[in-house]
Amino acid sequence: MSSVDGIHDMGGMQGFGRVVVEAEEPTFHAPWEGRVHAMVYLLIGGGVGSIDAFRHAIERITPVEYLSAGYYGRWVRAAETLLVERGLLREGELTRYIAGDRMPPSAGSTVPGERLKGFVREVATEPRFAVGAEVRARNLHPVGHTRLPGYVRGKRGVVRRVHGAYVLPDTNAHGRGECPEYLFSVRFDGAELWGEGAESAAPVSVDLFDRYLDPIGA
Amino acid sequence: MSRDGEEEHGHEHSENELRAEALETLLTEKGLVSSEAIDSIIRLFEEDIGPMNGAQVVARAWTDEGFRRRLLADANSAIGELDLTTMLEAPLVVVANEPSVHNVVVCTLCSCYPSGLLGISPAWYKDPSYRSRIVREPRRVLSEMGLDIEPSTEVRVWDSSAEVRYMVLPARPPGSAGWDVERLAKLVTRDSMIGTGRPRDASAVESGK
């Protein structure tokens, strides 16, 4: 398990240049991309790993490789990581297979875990914040997976929607349970996030779990 | 950034392809996936699920005020009223553009997108440039992408950081009064539902066709 402050947490980074838009872009740029997309869909849907575990596998790709492998290159690497961790592939099996070297097929083939059953859950408690509540995103740097983007940590915002309770990625990614929590859409002013030079009238809304937030005032 | 790093890293493409092929072979042997299931998912995204589905939703909302209200209140239920092929696994929130508000959607942490309705997202949506910049300088990024937003119009950025998915309901273009849903749907672009573009001009769609 590696730290979460990785290259994937891109909000607010600078230096990537203009957005390059491809005219008449195909659904997939090569057949293998579509096949990887479908395989990951089937593996997650089949219970090999949660979407959270898959995302965390992507986040553990080293920064240089994350950027150079491309989108579906990351997917195929993350799928391999998950399958090795679930005992469904041997470490290095893919690389050796490509080199023409078959490993003995002793890795498991039974799908562990449960099938996808959505992300929304019922919880007995009331949401801690109502629409209009002022909150501060906590300055957390957890080891492992989280969906608290770096650019909002420590920043003040206002709850604008209460989404209901969702599976918590921070625990679910690591097989530590669904631990459902309320999810809030929190709106942050541009100046709060980016300082005095921020563009005017350009707030950012981020969906944040209860444990990512502290109340202000009250 | 080049598309998937292919231009600067030509070797990555072939390495990715080799890995993908090996993965499919090994997973098929283990019975974890089947080539037929893979084919059918690819077919679904290449033929049945795409921006044309979102366009139907938008055009309906432009012509039916009751549907529009239901769509903004509970998009999954409202979309369920329509005869569309979708795979919406997560709650969808539709945010409406107004004269004083322009909405735009991103996922800074990965690539979350309402693909169960709009299909596979464009590569730029998943690239570092868009993900890093649209939250920090949305007006500038939108302008670079050909969409200038009036200073008096608020730009609201929605970072899809959890399992809720976001789609923009663009404003109905002038000059389309009296059009039916099918004709209006031709005005709706994918980018107008992400918030990085506008619908086509009414004059761009031939009359009566």
Image (cartoon, coloured by chain):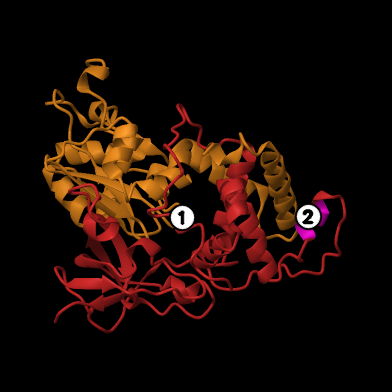
Q: Nearer the viewer, residue A148 or A113?
A: A148
**Viewed as shown, does residue A155 lie left or right of A180?**
left
Mark 1 vs mark 2: tell me if same chain: no
Tag 2: amino acid: Thr
Return the residue found at the far bottom.
A124
Tell me which residue sits at (14%, 82%) in the image. Answer: A218
Residue B79, placed above or below residue A120: above
Q: Which chain is orange?
A: B
Q: Which residue is mark 2?
A: A95
> Tag 1, which chain?
B
Residue drawn at x 60%, y 59% as measured from the top left:
A61
Label 1 sits on residue: B110
Chain for numbered disc 2? A
Percent position of residue A65, x then y: 62, 52
Q: Locate residue B93: give its quadrant.
A: bottom left
SS of the residue at dot 2? Answer: helix
Letter of the chain in red: A
- Residue B77 rendering spot, x and y as whole percentages: 26, 55
In the depicted structure, whether residue A30 falls above or below residue B93? above
Q: For this view, does B173 lie left or right of residue B1?
A: left
Residue A95 part of the magenta-drawn span: yes
Region of the chain picked out in magenta, as a range: A93-97
SS under mark 1: loop
Horizontal arrangement in the rendering, residue B69 relative to residue B81 (left or right): left
Residue B76 shows up from this direction: no
